[in-house]
Each structure stands twice: as C-alpha cells, then as structure tokens.
Image (tube, helix red, strand yellow):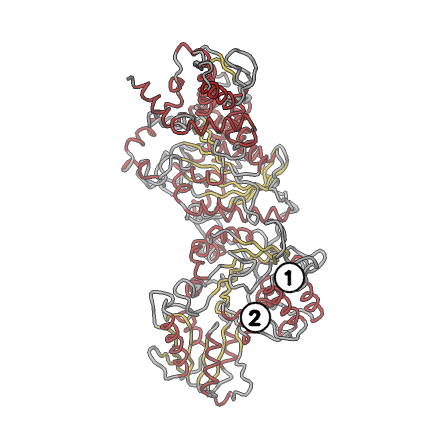
Amino acid sequence: MSDQSSVYTAYRGNSYLFGGNAPYVEEMYENYLANPGSVPDTWREYFDALQHVPAADGSNAKDVPHMPVINAFAERAKQGGTRVVGAASADSDFSRKRTAVQQLIAAYRNVGCRWADLDPLKRTERENIPELEASFYGFTAADQEAVFNTSNTFFGKESMSLRELTNALRETYCGTIGAEFMYISDQGRKRWWQQKLESIRAKPNFSAEKKKHILDRLTAAEGLERFLHTKYVGQKRFSLEGGESFIASMDELIQQAGSKGVQEIVIGMAHRGRLNVLVNSLGKMPADLFAEFDHTAKEDLPSGDVKYHQGFSSDVTTPGGPVHLSLAFNPSHLEIVNPVVEGSVRARMDRRADPRGKQVLPVLVHGDAAIAGQGVVQETLALAETRGYFTGGTVHIVINNQIGFTTSDPRDTRSTLYCTDIVKMIEAPVLHVNGDDPEAVALVTQLALEYRMEFAKDVVVDIVCFRKLGHNEQDTPSLTQPLMYKKIAAHPGTRKLYADKLAAQGLGESLGDDMVKAYRAAMDAGKHTVDPVLTNFKSKYAVDWSPYLGKKWTDAADTAIPMAEWKRLAERITTVPDNFTVHPLVKKVLEDRAAMGRGEVNVDWGMGEHMAFASLVASGYPVRLSGEDVGRGTFTHRHAVLHDQNRERWDTGTFIPLQNVAENQAPFVCIDSILSEEAVLGFEYGYASNDPNTLVIWEAQFGDFANGAQVVIDQFIASGEVKWGRVNGITLMLPHGYEGQGPEHSSARLERFMQLSADTNIQVVQPTTASQIFHVLRRQMVRSLRKPLVIMTPKSLLRNKDATSPLSEFTRGGFQTVIPETKADLKADKVKRVIVCSGKVYYDLAKKREEKGADDTAILRVEQLYPFPHKAFATELKKYPNATEVVWCQDEPQNQGAWFFVQHYIHENMADGQKLGYSGRAASASPAVGYSHLHQEQQKALVDGAFGKLKGFVLTK
C-alpha cells in the first residue's frame, strides 16, 4: 500500500465523517432530511451546503430520506421480491467527490492558518497537514478541472473547478494572514468572517496614497528607535525594532475607529514599543521624551517611575472627528494593566450613557509570552461578557516577536499551538499576520475593528514579527538564540522591504530614503510626529480632577444626615412592590430595618451600610459595589438585591430598593462578580481612576482572599499616586476577624496594608459600630480627598447587639478616628492601665473588664490606623494622667496585625515613665490556627493578658 493510500485510509478511520462516526452521521442526515430543525446548527449548516450540490444526474432534484426506501426494499427481499443491486459506480464516485469538496473547504477554514506564511524569519518548514491537500480526499490530477458547486463560499462564483477552488482557498487562508474563527458558535458571526475574507481572498487593495502613508508610519517607527539607539547608547527603552508594523496597525486602528464614531480609545500595553507609541501614535513631543532620557524632565512626584511605565493622553484628528487617546500607566507586571484599562473604559461608557461601547474603545497590547503565561489574561477575558464588566469588546494586538524574554523553543514557551489560544475561551477570533506584510497588518486591523464595532465582541490581531535587539538594550540575545539572531542580522528590516516593494510598483525610487531624512529632521528638531495633535480641545465628558487635588485627610466632612431625611430613606429602602414575594428571612430583615428607621431599636451594621448608600445616591453620588456575592453579602447581612420567591423566569424577579430611593437619584450598581480577585479589583481600580464622583467599592468574600489581588494592591492602589500622580478613591471592604474559622478565613492581612502605608497614600480603618461604617463610607465621598480606603470589616459584629448604634449617632457627629472610653462611671484619675486596641477584640476586652470589675482600666479603640490620628489619640490618652501602663491588645499574631506599626505611634504620645506592653497571639507563620479549641485558648489568653502583668517586650518612655 502506498503512503498516500495509507494516509487516506487512516483518515477515513478517524475523520468525523467516516470511521466509527459514520452511522451517527447517517442517522443525523436522515433526521435533517425529515426535519432540518432537529439537528444542531453546525450540522445543519453543513447539510444545507450539500443541498446546493447538483444531483448525480445533473438535475436539481433534492435529496430525500433514505431509510424509508431501504426499509421498503428490505421488506420486499424478505418476501422474495426483486434483488437490490448497487448504485452505478459513476454516481457513487461523484457523490463522494462533492462531499469531499465540502470537506476540503471546511479544512481550509478550520486549519488553513497552519499553512499561512506568518514568520518573517522563515525559521521552520511548513508542517505536514494532509487535510489541506486535495489528494487526501481521493482526488487525482484528472480531477483538477472538474467543476463543483461552490455556492456556500464567498469567492463570487456558483461553481469552480477543483484547481480554481483550491487556489482560492490557499490565497485566502494560507497567505500572510492566518485566520482562526471556526470555533465561534454563532453561525452569523462565523459566516461574517468567511464573507469578509473570501470575498477579497484576504488581500488588501489600497491606493497609492494609502501605501505611502503605511510606509510613513513604518519609517516613523524605525526612525525613532534608531535615533534613540544612537543618541542614548545602552539606555533601556525596550525597542520595537522588528515589530514596526505595530505602529502602522495602531495608526489604522485610531483613524478607522474615529471614522466609526469612537471618541475615546484607552490603551494598555507593557514596555515593548511603548516609547514608540507615545511619540508616533499619541503624539508626545519627542523633545519631552528626550528630556526624560537626559534627566532634565520635571520631577515633582515623591517617587516617580521609569519612562517606559509612563502614561499619556492626547487628542488627535480622525476622519470622524477628534479622538481622545489615553495610554494607561502600568508597572512591569505584564498584563496586570488589562483589567485596569477595562475598568477605565466602563467608567467612560457609563458617563456617556454608552452601554454598547460605541464611543469608547479598549485596546490591549500583549507580548507573545505574556498573553500565554499570565493568569490575569484569563481572568480579564472571563469578565468580557458579564453584565457588570462588559466594555463592548476589546481589540487585542499581540506583538509576537517569537521569543518573549529569552525563550523561543516551542517546547518551553507554552503548552498551546498559538500564544493566543487562551482567547478561544470567549470565542474571540484571531487574525495572525506576517509583520513583514504591513498592508496585511493594516487590513486585519480594519477587519478586527469592524468586527468589534458590529458585534461588540473581543477580537485579536497577532502580529508575528521579531525582536532585533535583546529584551532590553543591554542584553546579548545571541547567547541563548544564536540561530534566530543570525537570521535577524540578515534581515533588512520591514521598512526597507516595503519601501523596495513600493519602488518596484513605481511609487518612487527615493520615496523611502526621503521619508527617512524627513523623520530624522523632525527628531533633531524635537517636533511632533503625529499631525495634527489637538492642543486646546477638551471633551465635555472630560473629568476635572482639580477639586480633589491638594486635600488633607484631616479636612472636615459633614457626614450626618437630618432626621427627616433618615426616616424618608429608611422607608424607601424597606419597601417592596405589592406583587413581590420576599423570602421569610429577608422579610424579617426588612421589618427590623423599618423599625430601626423609625428609631424603635438600635441600628445594625447592614442598616448602617444601606443608609450610607441611600443617602449618597440621593445626594447625587453614584455607588458601585462589586465582589463575590455582594448582593446578599457573604454573611447574609446586606440583602441589597431582593429575589421574588414566586418568579417564573431565571432572568427576572429581582428588586433593588437602593435604586428606588429618590427621583433623579444617582445610580446604585451592585454586581456579583465572577470568582476572581485580581482582575475584578484591577477593574474597579480602573473605574475609580476615571470617576472621582462615584463611590467604587470592591468587597472580598473573605479578607484573606485579597492577597489573590496583591499585585493590584501593591503596584496600583498603594503606590499609583506617588509613582504616577494618579489620584484614586477606591474603597476595599475586607472581612477580617479571628473567630475560629482557620488560617484562610480569619485575616485580611492588616499588617500588609500597614507596611504599605506611607506618604499619606491610603486610609486604613477598622470600624466597630454601625454608625462608624455609615460615617466612613459617606466621608469617602462627601470629603474632597480621594485616597484609597481600606476597611477591615467585621463578621460576628454584623449581628452583635453591642455593635449597634442609636439613631442619634447618624443624625449628628461623624467618623471617630479614635473612640474614647464609653464606660460612663469610670473614674479617669483612678485609671492605672490603658488598653489600646482596634477591631472586634474590643468587645472581648469590655466583657472581661466587667467580669473582673477592673475599674482601674480604660479601653481606647483606634478606628483609623493610618494615617494615625495622633491628635485624637493624644487627647484621649492624656485623660488618664495616673496611668503607668499602656497595653496594645490584638487578635492577630505578634508578627502580624498592627502591632509593629502602631507601637511607635503609641510610644510617641505616651507620657514619660509610662510603660508600653503587648498582649496578643505569639508570632506565627500562619495567620490563625485551625483547631477550634486552640483558638479559644489563645483568645482567652490574650484577653487575660491585657489585664495581667506585663510580659515579654516592654518599652518605657
């Protein structure tokens, strides 16, 4: 048997149309003929195509179900009737071939990209894919001129010869563009791609002027890199050389987006090519960039950042009008900027009342190693189709230099065929394109944008290119990639190749050289390279941040609300429609809250939260609350979203009282997020970074899980202002409390936030009463200061009657950074020891004091741990002039919690001669123990220790 026939035999045994699947396919075809709607869409499309193929006799007769005919003959055979003979071999052969033609078309649409000419370096041989050869399906040279029906293609012909069809398929799917889209489940979108690609055979048809413009952008991309390379030798800039077509892609995207009505584009990208985008896409003045290299640029931030992390914004002209461009600031943590960009885009969409993203476009630029390797990519993609995080589809562009950092061996780079395979989880189409064909790059960029604008779905452009230099300009890449860099050294450059191509087309022998000289002159002069950049344009949707700058955390804020407003809001948030049936447990909650609203009983935590939200939205401040199970609340204390127990459809029957508190109120949005910390928190940070007027809250399911988003906390929330000057008022609510639930359900890692606290960068609070959470949430908006607010929220205190507050504490007063001693009969001059604490442990200490009758001990609660309230704390401590001992008591282990960070604050405010001691759990590698009995023993010991003799570390003032 020949190799060819053995391959064919193997195929027939394994293909989805042959082998063990044949009976299944035959049965499905029978069902289709009887009722086309009874088979899945994918099979119906395939069987529909077969109906366009002429019958064996050349007629247009339609196929009919075979089983009734077969059964009739079988019955006649049983009765001794006429013998059944086989069909004519010619008819059988033609039927097989027409099926084979459909298989050939399907093969090119599915895997044709694997034969596409994508690698500018041509490092590998074309892989063997038998399905893309006509001979694989039994065709011979004699069949090449045979004509078959091709009405299910978009080549513009109802029928084509096998040779003509094969050539058309190869031109479309195996040229310098390789398209992947056949995994899309929606037939309309799949056919859209087939029509767009096949109708032009994936070949652009640009005018001479368009081609010159593409060359101009390539010249700019290469020109900037070479200018910087010679002027700033050895300085890191993460060159784009080898991937210059990316700038042509960005230019095409911006101009085409503007013509389609987009008014804002928000871009997120890492360092590779970033300086090039700043100058050649956003129009940053080259002179300003050079000043950063020369260290003569203005340095007015506490820390600042390197030049290739800097963000930028500008307004450029497009055929459709001005477009505002924003390049997001980002750290070196690749891909972490993705959810931040998406959140920023959603904020802009909401501000414009643009729910489909027709006016705002997110663009994410990836590296080939990062998109395949970083988990936040998957988390961000998972947000794409959800209601709370939808941004109308993102255009992704991959600068695929085929090496990442130092690894290009496919056995090590990833476990998928393409670096972009992760996007298939949301059925995003991928357009792979050879970076050495800049016209093809421009074409796929056009198609990608058109798809996004029409369907509001993500789409990917994968520009396969190379990296001329090392990971940075101080690397020697040939140390690990000698073969690759021999090929790169011999490559003339994309700009040179394209300039030569245009010269050969008669567009000017000196065109390329003239453009190089002109760009070099612009660089020498430090002038704009994007023309024109609008310098005085300001959109009506632009955010004015000036009211929030230069504020102090000590600025006063009136957070109390009038009694009449309290009662009005309380009635609104406890009223549900007459035909709405709430769960009996929720009904009891609403009845209790109504009583709280009337002042009949003290207000609990859930009501305090609700009244903060209600009063804010009624005053024009939107509230956006997101996280895992935030509608109900992890500990079922919130019930912001009510569910009709008699609803008949899964997608109806919810009621949100906070959306019905007043006419013309601000929005209240409550989003149960996907099971993600990193991407969701990044999204909310991005949202808050673009909307200072909205209270943006991310709540962790348990505070322990916030460390899943540690990169966002470290690189953005804690340091974004001192690095980049980005003001942000995001609020984090992190359930925290030692209640015997084990190592992963006890600690929000307070110590980490304390360690990050400096330069008045964040606010860290641990409120212990319902009125405190009410006032601190309102303070975050009413006060003009916009700093991240980290709230250590309780668990058991949510239902602890001692943590409730009288109504009077909501209608007057404000957030107390330090809560004084509340024992009315305590004699200040009799106090010998002052216990200082924060959080839930206060209630354990107060109970213990009553049990012991320790009237010589005062207890102070520090509710704001950073910025530390020195003035308020000193005032309270001085009330006890005869106190000789101060004890800090905490639930957390000694090496965790606030102890190491507040001890010097306490010491600073103590009187001479006073001693400072510690009572809490011993230092531990784990946040908490998992054994309940051990937890109880530790809790008892630390509370007892707060009243006992000072032990261990004692510091005397």
Horizontally, is 448 left or right of 127 in the view?
right
Query: Residue 318: x and y, percent?
Result: 60, 34
Residue 501 is at least partly visible in this image: no
Q: How many marks?
A: 2
Q: Secondary structure at mark 1?
A: helix
First-in-chain label (2 vs 1): 1
Horizontal relation, residue 327 to residue 128: left or right: right
Question: Which quadrant would the N terminus be assigned to in this image?
Answer: top left
Compared with residue 426, is residue 127 higher up or lower down, i.e. above or below? above
What residue is drawn where x is 40% and y is 45%?
A: 374
Check the picture and name the quadrant holding the C terminus: bottom left
Picture layout, residue 52 above or below residue 765: above
Task: Looking at the picture, tell me which residue is in the foreground, 323 or 173.
Answer: 173
For the residues labelled 2 and 1, the Cα–Cα distance comes to 16 Å
Please provide percent x and percent y for residue 130: 37, 23
- Using the rendered image of the protein, determine whether residue 807 is visible from the camera's viewpoint: yes
Q: Secondary structure at mark 2?
A: helix
Q: Which picture quadrant has residue 126?
A: top left
Is 790 rendered above or below residue 844? above
Q: Name the residue that disc number 2 marks.
A: 772
Marker disc for residue 838: none
Amino acid type of disc 1? Leu
* Whether label 2 touches label 1, CB < 8 Å: no
